[in-house]
Amino acid sequence: MLKEDLNRLVTQVGPGTGCGKLMRQYWQPAALTEELTGDRPVKAVTLMGEDLVIYRHGDDEYGLIGRACPHRGADLCFGRWEDGGLRCAFHGWLFDHTGKCLEQPAEPAGSNFHNKIKHTAYPCIERNGIVFTYMGKGNPPPLPAFDCFEAPDEFTFAFKGFVDCNWLQLNEVGIDPSHASFLHRFFNDETDDEAYGQQFRFSTEENDMAITKVLREYDCPEIEIEQTETGIRLYALRRLNDASMHVRVTNQIFPNAIIIPISNEMMLTQWHVPINDTTSWWYAIFSSFSEKVDKERMRNDRLELYTLPDYRPRKNRDNNYGYDPEEQRNRTYTGMGDDINVHDQWAVESLGKIQDRANEHLGTTDKAIIANRKLMIRAIEALENDAEPEIALRPDDPAMCRGPVAIDTIAPAASWRDTWKATAIERRSRSAWAQHPWPSET
Ligand code: FES
Ligand SMILES: [Fe+2]
């Protein structure tokens, strides 16, 4: 549990809040590139309580500036996209992506007033379908060399979805390995082809055992955690028999992302991004080591579940997430269909807009959640004292921020620690693009 004041500390994200300052020290997803195409690539976004406008300039450069014009406060989201910047529709002031005011056409000729205006602006970098921004103090760090950023575009697919609650409860479902045996339980297994690009629904390549079966029949995993350079590594261990162990290795990337295996080929890196204190986005890059990702199929599958252009889930609180008691009796644990995003959506939204953590009762399986909250509180305190968080993701050499591993495998019970690493190395060695050998720090 967390007392009310600490709960506020780790959930409130506006400018000047402890958690808000922490989150701003890391690159955060601001938009999908697919939202910034066409004749007028301009879109309003709210990030961590700040109302902003994002736009493309040039071929693949992006600007993110304050939404309220610094002249009289008009909405720059309706601005004219021209001359490499955004021109306010009220009196024609023109801003570039650095926040510089380039022109004030109604001011007298020769006026220097425009040089005195510095509008809010944040730097942007695009990687594999997502525009990331840095809203923190000082210089932004280099983008880490995570696999999802290193993979060539055709080995990746990006998407996002709206979640109607605070970012932390969304983040915490990603570091809670035991829920998968219940919330995502299917009473029957399916083929890997049906499960393409879907979490928890493939077979391990070692013995063709469906993950759905592993989760269903071995529902009391032993969970181990350890702190790494990038966050918290989790091991969910399910002993299948005296000889074999199902090993699922996932990584939380501090402070608000996770990387998990989607299949023997594919990984999912997912950020949990606050829109404000009570709503969030998940942003995901699916990436694959050796097979190109079928982007069209991935996208079509998701468009069955989400509406555009707002990326809202079709199944949501307003329609009871599609809940069907007959299905709950016979087919799935939740009765909310096959897509696990719907299950997670229900779970995290049912905790309330901001979960009251003073009234929860955390057990043994919640150890990563507890460790992550402690890490966050220490990081917030460090920043208050002008020190670096323990996990700063600011190495001198960005290649040191790499991986992290995501793997589901079946290993000999006696040597699972060595075997999962060997399997991870072997999968990486098949990669069409991964340059560096698997880091020794695994
Ligand atoms: S309010 Fe934007 S130029 Fe006047
Ligand atoms: Fe889940």
Image (cartoon, rainbow, N blue to C red):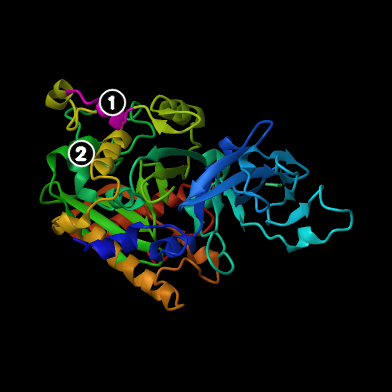
* Kind of residue indicated by mark 1: Asn
Pointer 1: residues within 10 angstroms few (<14), some, or many (20+)? few
Q: Range of the magenta residues?
A: 315-324
Q: Disc 2 marks which residue? A: 183
Q: Quadrant of residue 84?
A: top right
Residue at screen point 45% across, 68% down: 392
Residue at screen point 35% across, 34% down: 198
Q: Position of residue 188 (x, y in %)?
A: 19, 27
Residue at screen point 28% across, 57% down: 234
Residue 303 vertical placement versus 391 (above, below): above
Residue at screen point 33% across, 51% down: 171
Magenta segment includes 322: yes
Q: Disc 1 marks which residue? A: 319
Q: Position of residue 378 (x, y in %)?
A: 33, 72
Q: Earlier in the sequence, mark 2 or mark 1?
A: 2
Residue 427 vertical placement versus 209 (above, below): below
